[in-house]
Image (spheres, rainbow, N blue to C red):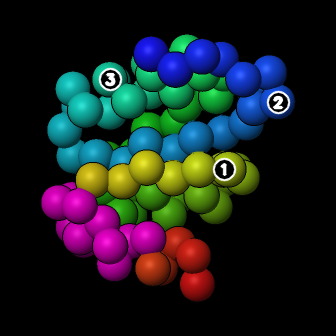
Amino acid sequence: MMQRESNIQNENALVVSGDADTRKFLSTELIGCGYQAIEAIDGSDTFKKLSEMNVEIVISDIDLPDVDGITLCRQVFT
């Protein structure tokens, strides 16, 4: 696990994956680093979460149920 950085405490990180085990693992690691981890299961859930809150980092699977991760990232950052 990475060391906790005090300057990232309470910043939101969004973990996007269709696999529950992957989401849980990444969320646990991010929490250990000081982030508030938010989970999304697919592209539409991602955009719902992004409309509700600000996030500092998005970590996405490439293979999502409704969109590929690269397309998702392009849509998020445009």
Q: Position of residue 56 (x, y in %)?
A: 67, 50
Residue 67, label in figure: none
Query: Which residue is situated farthest in the right direction here?
Result: 7
Q: Earlier in the sequence, mark 2 or mark 1?
A: 2
Cα distance in 3D space between marks 3 and 2: 22 Å
Q: Is residue 20 magenta?
A: no
Q: Position of residue 40 (x, y in %)?
A: 40, 46
- Tell me the mark number nearer the camera, choosing from 3 and 2: 2
Q: Which residue is mark 2?
A: 7
**Amino acid type assigned to the residue bearing label 1 in the image:** Val
**Amino acid type assigned to the residue bearing label 3 in the image:** Phe
Left or right, residue 50 beside residue 44: right
Region of the chain picked out in magenta, as a range: 62-73
Q: Quadrant of the N terminus?
A: top left
Q: Which residue is mark 3?
A: 25
Left or right, residue 70 beside residue 76: left
Cα distance in 3D space between marks 1 and 3: 19 Å
Task: Confirm or deny contact between disc 1 and disc 3 (CB under 8 A).
Answer: no
Q: Which residue is mark 1?
A: 55
Q: Earlier in the sequence, mark 1 or mark 3?
A: 3
